[in-house]
Amino acid sequence: MTADSSALDEYVALFRAGRFFEAHEALERLWLFRDGDPFLQGLIIFAAAYVKVQRGEGAGARTHFMRALRYMRAYVPEREGFDTAAMAIHVERCLAALAAGQPVPPFDMRRAQVPPPAAAPPASDEEVLRVLGEVAKRRTPGVRPLLDDVPEALLRLRGRAGAGRVHRLHRSVRGR
């Protein structure tokens, strides 16, 4: 077990115990050791968002969740045993809950070895358009304008369609 692994395991254990501030603190030294690693920054901000939730600071939680999402999207679908795709989707749910004045759902943080993804066939244009349509239907007023449909569609397609193709199809549907 490496020092990196130990700090990450401690983060997960504290997060799962609902000790979000301590989870945030558990990664600080490792983050500094790695010269401000943006992946660790995203995990730290994710825990800090839950600190804001615990304190009843909805606006602060929203800001932290949005920042965490920007970091997590860069590491989809996985990094260092964290399912960053699931985390990014969960953050979107948290933002929707905050916008609707509902409680923020918990996240069951697990850290496990993620097997390499099985080779999946490329998504057809029809499948890409279907996913874009589903994403558009789920838009939450006040939240979605800040978050584009294309990144969420790319998350859902998990590498089976390139960003250029998804952007092109998105523009064709929106009439641009």
Image (cartoon, grey):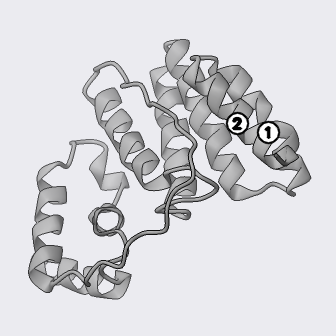
Q: Who is closer to the viewer here, 107 or 112? A: 112
Q: Position of residue 38 (x, y in %)?
A: 70, 57
Residue type pointed to by label 1? Ser
Q: Residue at x 37, y 34 (%)?
A: 94
Label 1–label 2 contact, CB within 8 A? yes
User: Residue at (57%, 38%) from the top-left corner?
Assistant: 46
Residue 9 - label = 2
Farthest residue to the right: give it: 33
Q: Residue at x 30, y 29 (%)?
A: 97
Image-based side of 65 in relation to 165, left or right: right
Q: Position of residue 166 (x, y in %)?
A: 27, 80
State which quadrant residue 155 falls in.
bottom left
The residue at which mark 1 appears reads as 6
Q: How many marks?
A: 2
Q: Position of residue 74 (x, y in %)?
A: 55, 64
Q: Amino acid at mark 2?
A: Asp
